[in-house]
Image (cartoon, rainbow, N blue to C red):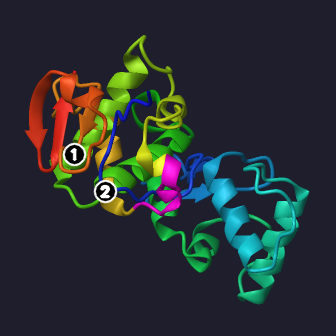
Amino acid sequence: MKKTWMIGALSLALLGGAAGVVCAVQAPVGAEVTAEAAVLRQGSTGGEVKEVQRRLKNWGYYSGAVDGVFGAGTRRAVISFQQKNGLTADGVVGKATYKALGMNASYNVLAGQGGSGGTNGYTSSDLYLMAKAIYAEGRGESYTGQVAIGAVIMNRVKSPQFPNTVAGVIYQKGAFTAVDDGQINLEPNETAYSAARDAMNGWDPTYGCLYYYNPAVATSAWIFERQTVTVIGKHVFAI
């Protein structure tokens, strides 16, 4: 019998994760660093690259595989897009190209990290995927309720009962309705990104829960047998 571990209003965004090269702008000794640049270029990999490829392919600039690998074909497509939109045609996806692609939120998340890693040791790909899961599962919930969804994912990553990666937990078969129905492919908003960061940094409003569900729509009798720890918004959090 399929276990319905997480149920909720779902709507996620693409996946894989916001990945790429994140570079701090270097200033002369004694000068103040005033800006950071987040860029994707040939050699970058991950969910951010995959999203760039998806958009370029939808718009007719790219004909290769949407595989999250920034190769020569992706670079050519970026250059073509940049030329068409009056941008510097260098094949590098920086701030201006992110904006033209309609990916401002992703750029801000990458630049805000100030490094090539993610939040609290997790990668930018993990952050992006976590934000998508939170947006899909809880975009109608309070901010605390959204952080709580992220906390459950983090608790599962740390538990020997579940996969030990963010992607492994989210894509575990039958774990999230959003993955099953495709809403995982919606684009997360800034609130979801913030909630993901807070969850990754250790905020756990669920006190260690491994499950949550919406009792109004849950269909699995199994989930109702779990011990309830707290209720936040429409979701019951349990162990």
Bounds of the magenta span? 180-188
The answer to whether residue 127 is left or right of residue 147 is right
Which residue in the structure is indicated by mark 2? 9
Circle 2 residues within 10 Å: few <14, some 14–19, many ≥20: some
Amino acid under label 2?
A: Ala
How far from the left and from the top, in percent, is residue 87?
A: 71, 82
For label 2, the SS is: loop
The answer to whether residue 176 is left or right of residue 144 is right
Circle 1 residues within 10 Å: few <14, some 14–19, many ≥20: some
- At horizontal 67% and vertical 64% (from top left) the residue drawn is 52
The residue lying toward the viewer, choosing from 72 and 191, is 191
The answer to whether residue 53 is left or right of residue 12 is right
Q: Is residue 187 magenta?
A: yes
User: In the figure, 186 relative to 206: above or below?
Assistant: below
Instruction: Name the quadrant containing residue 77.
Output: bottom right
Which residue in the structure is indicated by mark 1? 214
* Residues tagged 2 and 1 counted as in contact (Cβ below 8 A): yes
Instruction: Identify the image quadrant of the C terminus.
Output: top left
- At horizontal 39% and vertical 55% (from top left) the residue drawn is 136
The answer to whether one can see residue 40 in this image is yes
The residue lying toward the viewer, choosing from 37 and 72, is 72
User: In the figure, 116 relative to 12: above or below?
Assistant: above
- At horizontal 82% and vertical 62% (from top left) the residue drawn is 74
The residue lying toward the viewer, choosing from 163 and 192, is 163
